[in-house]
Image (tube, rainbow, N blue to C red):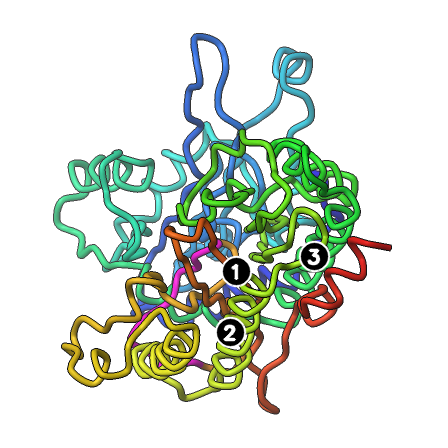
Amino acid sequence: MKYLPISNTLFTVNRKNFVSRIKPNSLALFHANDEFPKNGDQAFPFKQNADFFYLTGIDQEQSILILYPDCPNPLYREVLFLRQTNEHIAVWEGHKYTKEEARSASGIEGVYWLQEYDTILHSIINYAENIYINTNENDRYSHTVPYRDIRMLEQLQQKYPLHHYERSAPIMRDLRAVKSDIEIELTKKACEITRDGFVRVLKFVKPGVAEYEIEAEFTHEFLRQRSSGNAYSPIIASGANANVLHYIDNNQVCKAGDVLLLDVGAEYANYNADMTRSIPVNGRFTPRQREVYDAVLRVMKGAKALIQAGTLLSDYHEEVGKMMTSELIGLKLLDKTAVDKQDPKMPLYKKYFMHGTSHHLGLDVHDFASRYKPFEVGNILTCEPGIYIPEEGLGIRLENDILITNDGNVDLMADIPLEAEHIEDIMNS
């Protein structure tokens, strides 16, 4: 891992919060993510299961966590299993956690090698009444691949068919949405690295530069600051490419007169930033580009003010839709008479602003949280309105990450250039 060590207090508290919500005499199992083959002798870069990391701080493949707070044998109330290294692994793959390092990282005293897992699990599982299994219940995920948690569940059910199986996901959905102070600091770090990447790019962009060169500038700055890289596939979309919401080809040349949409974020210690900016390739917005930019910025500022504890996501999006409709009328993209007659279920603004304004942010870029639960203190949400006008070859989106506190909200990207004049000044300095 490139990032600096994290206090294991974070993971100790997370485990304590989780076990406080499970039924009495229950055992919970959490698995590291799979390693996915890339070709005959390579795997894709490993990315840890977010729930497993949240509870352990362990960033290594083939790891397992058992939580059984009522276990009759106190040695096995918190147990972490790790892949044991050897000379061959050390030569070909490098360093793996020692037991001492794993104890330090996780705060778990009971650390064992993976080959002891079956024996230890069998010695205690029959004393538990319930088995909590963790599965991916993010409603943005469509299950097509039998990932590790699912495969292990099938094996357990064959071996222990009469146990009562419970879902860990509803508990994790509530816990992960509310960030602790340590999580907030890690997210701030990801935002700071993203800021530095953006300022670097502002000084780099000019007509004739390719989108992939700009991507490389971001990646260079991210890695230079101990980030593991991009939080997601970066969108470097010049001109009409900005109207493709998930454009990731990043293979075109930036032209004078075009606006460049940059949707990027650094990942630090598995926590993510998510930023979008739209900048003029030649350093100056045209009057029309500035008109649309300012409209998006006004919606962003209005939407940000609504991100408060107690707000429902559905109500929030409805209010943002009203703001956007007013701006689109002002831009002469919508007709007020037509808007007055529109079907409320299919509002006309969706033609130019077709995505949601906010999503939760954390260990996942689209973090695991309920879309039906009111916003809470400790939530971090994006705020990302946009206006997309394919007939003008113009797409503008702006996005910052917002933390809800007891005293209102805090913009974690407030120090990243946003106002059009500020962006133009840096590009022309």
Q: Which residue corresponds to mark 2?
A: 295
- Looking at this rendering, what residue extends furthest in the top direction? 40
> Measuring 37% from the left and 78% from the top, which residue is drawn there?
329
User: Picture quarter containing residue 419?
Assistant: bottom right
- Comparing 68 with 333, the one in front is 333
The numbered mark, 3 or 2, whose residue comes first in the sequence reads 3
Q: In the drawing, does residue 62 fall left or right of residue 315?
A: right
Q: SS of the residue at dot 3?
A: loop
Q: Is 30 situated above or below 356?
A: above
Mark in front: 3 vs 2: 3
Whether residue 132 appears in this view of the structure is no
Dominant SS of magenta comes to loop
Q: Which residue corresponds to mark 1?
A: 362
The numbered mark, 2 or 1, whose residue comes first in the sequence reads 2
Q: Amino acid at mark 1?
A: Gly
Q: SS of the residue at dot 2?
A: helix
Q: Which residue corresponds to mark 3?
A: 284
* 367 magenta-colored: yes
Label 3 neighbour load within 10 Å: few <14, some 14-19, many 20+: many
- Numbered badge on residue 422: none
Q: CA distance from mark 1 to mark 3?
A: 34 Å
**Magenta segment range?**
365-375
- Comparing 14 with 183, the one in front is 183
Label 2 neighbour load within 10 Å: few <14, some 14-19, many 20+: many
Mark in front: 2 vs 1: 2
Q: Amino acid at mark 3?
A: Arg
- Looking at this rendering, what residue extends furthest in the right direction? 429
Percent position of residue 225, x then y = 78, 45
* 274 magenta-colored: no
